[in-house]
Image: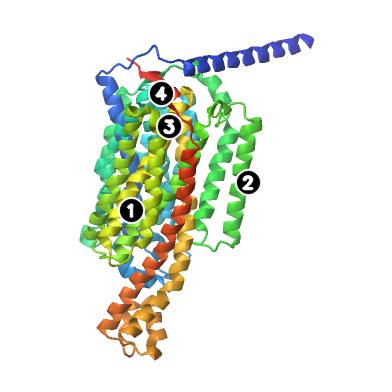
């Protein structure tokens, strides 16, 4: 018995010594100024990098097209049947837009499940991303990348061939999970194949691959405006295009992407690594984030915030997330969030906080800004798409250019991020001046604000990638992505409820005031407003209603929307100021910008 105990003790000591040696080797590699490995720029390396860039492109393209086509999909697979009173006034203003907001505004606030079509995509992405990055760091990037690309492919096919609600939700969830994996593995995969000091430049090149995606509002308008039976296949082509690009990326990755990392983890037996996976942490994080986001999307949308469904889901989700933090801190042997990620520097923690806050403003821009084009101005699909070109291009331009400048201005990375936060805060907040009469000003403000958003969103991840240990680069990118989505979901929930409450109160007042001002008898005001908000086709039959009254009521609805949007943009200023303060507290990452290369393509 004593012999057995001594053997067990020796085994534990050997295990501990092995891990101490691994940590020392990691620290030595992390601290080294230059890598002994140089980047070999041959055809295989170039094709591998290009394939990762294309995977990043398709991960983003599929998500924005999926979400922005959902109104068209609802038209065919089971559109919303119930309408709260104020939504009818928004119908002529929002049904032409390809953004996801019509889905929420026209269908979501009734007790309907159709709003979960686009939500399923984001929910799956945020839930799966942290565990995927962790697995990529343990098992290597190639296999996880292939799984992500395959999941996108299957999800696209399911959505493109869907004829039922369940099919679309399932396909959206699967493609969302795959897109999350694709986005994080593309960024971390490219980042570890180049010198640390050039990660900004190459991540900027990855982001620049999104330039063909920037007119996504126009794409969605053109696809989703084809709603007649003869053009039934129109919206599906958004999916087929995604599938084609995904196939090219998948082939390129399968043939050329064989990364070898300078990490002791990559030399350990697969069976040993499998035993050390943090399964408990994975369960707590995935289930906690999923339930938390479900509660946020349900509250005020499909259920009241005080309902048992929302409160129970929210509380359980929060407790699971707290349990995950305690488990990672005290009990996990191979945690999903290692302490060494934050040891010796504050950069990673602060950039995570910046990602969280910037996610709030990013979601306010991409969700609410397109809606202003159709609710305040001409709702023609082409006009909405043209107005959306500016900010779509500027977000990508901001992300690509600021990332690239981080390589050429290595001592001023913090200042670049700070300047972007100031632009984001000032110009998105300035959208509070939007009215039905200043379309050009509104587009200009949103375009400049979009540049600021782009200059924060991805560059914050890039700074974290430069300061983290090489063997945790996937973990850093995945956590930043999940934190950004969670922050965005919280922000969207706040913005949405502000908008809904303000619009619900303003619509009857604005419509009645405008209608009475052009001749509607005061005695008919209540009847007319009720008809206009519930059954617009019958509003003309109300006594005293003329064409001028109908036009004035439409103008009143526009001004009511402008009034509600005002509070959304003003609220965004508070979050923007927090991001500015965080940037001011961010230490310089200059000392981490070395020639060290974390991995290379196997030849």
**Crowd tier of the residue under label 4, counting other residues whose Cα lies within 10 Å: few below 14, some 14–19, many 20 or above:** many
Q: Position of residue 56 (x, y in %)?
A: 33, 36
Q: Which of marks 3 and 2 is in front?
A: 3
Which of pointers 1 and 2 lies earlier in the amino acid sequence?
A: 1
Tell me the CA gap for discs 3 and 2: 31 Å
- Relative placement, left or right, of 388 versus 301 is left
Q: Where is residue 238 in the image (x, y as percent from the top left)?
A: 27, 48
Residue where numbered disc 1 is placed = 68
Q: Which mark, by number, is residue 593?
A: 4
The C terminus, quarter of image = top left
Q: Are marks 2 and 4 in contact (CB under 8 Å)?
A: no
Q: How many marks?
A: 4
Residue where numbered disc 3 is placed = 463
Q: Residue at x 60, y 15 (%)?
A: 20
Which of pointers 2 and 4 lies earlier in the amino acid sequence?
A: 2
Which of pointers 4 and 3 lies earlier in the amino acid sequence?
A: 3
SS state under label 4 = loop
Q: Which residue is drawn at 42% across and 84% down?
A: 526
Which of pointers 4 and 1 lies earlier in the amino acid sequence?
A: 1
Q: Are marks 3 and 2 in contact (CB under 8 Å)?
A: no
Q: Is residue 233 above or below residue 334?
A: below
Residue where numbered disc 2 is placed = 319
Q: Which mark, by number, is residue 526?
A: none
């Amino acid at each position: 018995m004593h012999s057995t105990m001594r053997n067990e003790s020796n085994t534990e000591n050997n295990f501990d010594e092995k891990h101490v040696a691994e940590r020392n080797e990691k620290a030595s590699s992390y601290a080294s100024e230059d890598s002994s490995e140089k980047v070999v720029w041959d055809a295989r390396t170039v094709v591998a990098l290009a394939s990762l860039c294309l995977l990043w492109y398709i991960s983003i393209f599929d998500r924005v097209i999926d979400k922005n086509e959902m109104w068209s999909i609802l038209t065919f697979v089971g559109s919303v049947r119930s309408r709260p009173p104020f939504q009818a006034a928004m119908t002529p203003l929002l049904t032409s837009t390809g953004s996801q907001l019509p889905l929420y505004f026209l269908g979501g606030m009734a007790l309907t499940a159709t709003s979960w079509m686009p939500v399923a995509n984001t929910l799956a992405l945020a839930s799966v991303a942290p565990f995927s990055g962790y697995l990529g760091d343990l098992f290597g990037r190639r296999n996880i990348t292939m799984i992500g690309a395959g999941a996108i492919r299957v999800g696209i096919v399911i959505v493109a061939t869907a004829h039922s609600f369940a099919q679309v939700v399932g396909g959206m969830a699967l493609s969302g999970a795959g897109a999350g994996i694709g986005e994080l593995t593309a960024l971390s995969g490219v980042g570890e194949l180049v010198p640390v000091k050039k990660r900004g430049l190459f991540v900027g090149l990855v982001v620049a691959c999104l330039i063909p995606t920037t007119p996504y509002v126009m794409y969605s308008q053109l696809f989703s405006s084809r709603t007649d039976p003869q053009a039934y296949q129109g919206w599906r082509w958004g999916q087929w295009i995604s599938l084609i690009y995904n196939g090219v990326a998948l082939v390129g990755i399968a043939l050329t992407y064989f990364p070898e990392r300078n990490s002791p983890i990559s030399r350990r037996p697969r069976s040993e690594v499998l035993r050390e996976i943090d399964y408990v942490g994975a369960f707590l994080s995935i289930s906690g984030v999923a339930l938390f986001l479900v509660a946020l999307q349900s509250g005020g949308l499909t259920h009241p915030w005080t309902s048992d469904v929302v409160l129970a889901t929210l509380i359980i989700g929060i407790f699971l997330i707290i349990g995950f933090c305690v488990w990672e801190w005290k009990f996990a042997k191979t945690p999903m969030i290692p302490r060494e990620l934050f040891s010796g520097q504050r950069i990673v923690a602060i950039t995570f906080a910046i990602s969280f806050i910037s996610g709030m403003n990013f979601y306010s821009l991409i969700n609410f800004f397109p809606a202003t084009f159709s609710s305040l101005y001409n709702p023609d699909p082409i006009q909405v798409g043209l107005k959306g070109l500016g900010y779509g291009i500027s977000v990508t331009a901001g992300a690509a250019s600021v990332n690239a400048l981080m390589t050429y201005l290595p001592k001023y990375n913090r200042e670049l991020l700070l300047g972007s936060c100031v632009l984001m805060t000032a110009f998105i907040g300035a959208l509070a001046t939007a009215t039905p009469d200043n379309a050009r000003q509104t587009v200009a403000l949103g375009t400049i604000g979009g540049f600021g958003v782009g200059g924060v969103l991805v560059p914050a991840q890039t700074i974290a990638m430069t300061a983290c240990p090489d063997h945790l680069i996937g973990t850093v990118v995945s956590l930043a992505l999940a934190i950004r989505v969670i922050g965005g979901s919280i922000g969207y929930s706040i913005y949405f409820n502000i908008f809904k409450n303000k619009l619900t109160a303003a619509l009857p007042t604005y419509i009645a005031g405008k209608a009475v001002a052009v001749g509607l008898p005061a005695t008919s005001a209540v009847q007319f407003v009720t008809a206009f908000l519930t059954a617009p086709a019958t509003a003309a039959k109300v006594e005293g209603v003329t064409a001028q009254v109908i036009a004035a009521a439409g103008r009143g609805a526009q001004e009511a929307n402008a009034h509600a949007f005002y509070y959304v943009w003003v609220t965004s200023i508070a979050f923007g100021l927090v991001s500015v303060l965080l940037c001011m507290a961010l230490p310089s990452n200059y000392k981490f910008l070395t020639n060290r290369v974390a991995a290379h393509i196997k030849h």
